[in-house]
Amino acid sequence: MKNKPFPHYIISPYETFEELLAIVKSKYGDKVLFRTKRRKSEETVTYNQFYDDVQKLASHFSKTYGARNKIAVIGENSYEWILTYFAVVCSNNIIVPIDKELSAPDIAELLIECECRTLIYSKDYDDIADDIGGIILDFEAIAMPKLRGFIESVESAEWITTDKNAPASIIYTSGTTGKSKGVVLSQKNICEDTRAACGFIELYGRTIALLPFHHTFAFTVSGLANIYYGVDTLIAPSLKNVMELINDFKPTYLAVVPMIVEKVDKGILAKIEKSGKKKLLGILDKVCKPFDAMNIGLRNKCFSAIRNGLGGELDFIISGGAPIDQQIIDRFDSYGIKIINGYGISECSPVVSVNRRYHYRAGSIGQALPEVKVKIDNPDENGEGEICVQGDIVMLGYYNIPEETEKAIVDGWFHTGDLGKLDKDGFIYITGRIKNLIILSNGKNVSPEELETLIGRIPGVVECLVSEEDNKLVAEIYPDEELRAAQSNIQSYFNEQIDQLNDTLPPYKAIAKVIIRDTEFVKTTTKKIKRTYKK
Amino acid sequence: MLDKVISIISEYQDIPADTIHADSHLVNDLGFTSYDVVSLVGKFEDEFDIEVPDRKIKLMKTVDDIVKFIEAATEE
């Protein structure tokens, strides 16, 4: 059935991680859940093993830390990372996933803010753990290899009773003012969102967990939905050698950010150009079209050369974290690989809407998930207004900032800060943004105000504006006239200053280009610099 | 070493080798994305049989940074 209303998949009810684990243990038992590869060796974990490991580690955490304490986790993607997440939540404690690109002082600031004194880290981050220990008193850092010892020390374990409505996770997200805000989610939030997303998308076969697990979209798709559907998941610790991994493991689907899809797309286009078969592929596309309407899949055969370059068994790609170009979606469609895109925000656990595999609209971000309500607040004459969300997926609030929570959740509706409209079938279209957040194609959100504050501290900067151009950050600076007169090469001066600033920032916040202005910026009536929104 | 590194970059990014220099900035001059840089490092790992922790990748800003890293890693 092509692009017609399509029934929802029936998903077993669960509201806690323990309930999810009980379901998948009985369904999949000794089937492989996770694979990890280190150089030439491969290790596997079955559903039964994962169930036992989580139960025992949760029991250890419960005995050691009691309940309602925060435990942070940092590291590259690994079995231990995901095990930590589950075990902390199942021990009635609160997991704080940390972005591994942050510096030790930045991490320490977040940990202090959420009163977290325990960090579980992978061995590549032992210096970070040491540095944080120098900043926070009473800080405990646990290296991931120790977890196995904890599990083995537990002879028999019982599940700990947890409250599905209590805080289970605090995720730090880029605030619009530059200060990170801790999004507090309950197990019910997370489980309802994953269940609803699974009701829209059926996962099967094999996948590679490429995106960092601290990314909420990555964890939902590659750490929760895949588990529910019994997917065999290869955990990739890094984005190095992605194409080799895809060709070796032959995934049936992938969850990635647009940046990766864009790169693959560029590679395919370059190969087509070099092969001189562009015209032939155009003809094949036309030949396939009438068969698409009859639901006869000719494309797998006609475009097998392209598909084989992606392992040969890739049926669909879930793209999240940032908007994706419709032209790329259309091109992959022609190869017989569906790109499923949607919309999410950490505050909504995170998936809000999805364009389904067989029911979608070009240019849209799909329909709201089952049991999730979306409305357009205060629409203008074109039906455009702020996208608001209601349902069990909406966060409990921002950690320790009730005033921000009150601003964000009004009368039970979460205000996303994104502008959009709905069509008659409930498909959502993003049209703009109220908040000043730059969303890069690698899924990273950057607050321009945060960087502008830092740039504003550079001697000689009168005004500055940070924006995005070709997926890179650009700083436009209006310099002090005296400095302009004194510096023979003002461009070099600011390039050097920005380079020094970049050294202190996580790579995704680095400024790639500096533009010097001769005139002041155009201001709004309230004397703020005018920004223009880019889709 | 520099020539080999330039050759791999040239092939990866599909740009002429003579436009790549030791002081070329991977992002600003050669148009790399952060994903490209990580992916490229994977190629150097295979080529030179070295292991580069992800956290070290952010230190590789120019072609020369890569050359120096590989030289140090292969000497160890």
Image: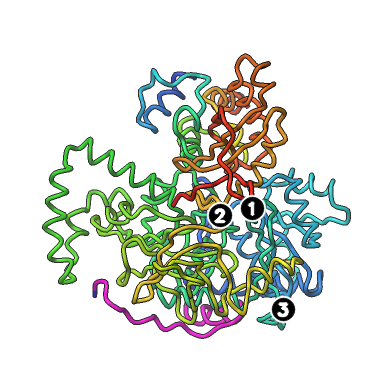
Q: Position of residue A99 (x, y in %)?
A: 64, 53
- The structure's colour scheme is rainbow
A415 lies left or right of A428 = right
The alpha-carbon separation of the residues under discs 3 and 2 comes to: 32 Å
Chain-order first, disc 3 or disc 1: 1
Chain-order first, disc 2 or disc 1: 1
Residue position marked by numbered label 2 in the rendering: A212
- A123 lies above or below A52: above
Q: Is residue A19 magenta?
A: yes
The residue nearer to you, when weighing A129 against A144, is A129
Which quarter of the picture shows residue A18? bottom right
Indicate which disc residue A294 carries. none
Q: Position of residue A276 (x, y in %)?
A: 17, 37
Indicate which disc residue A156 carries. 3
Q: Are marks 2 and 1 in contact (CB under 8 Å)?
A: yes
The alpha-carbon separation of the residues under discs 2 and 1 comes to: 8 Å
Which kind of residue does numbered mark 2 sit on? Pro
Q: Tag 1's secondary structure?
A: loop
Residue extent of the magenta highlight: A2-28
Indicate which disc residue A99 carries. 1
**Which is closer to the viewer, label 3 or label 2?**
2
**Chain containing the residue with disc 2:** A
Residue at 67% over, 47% down: A102
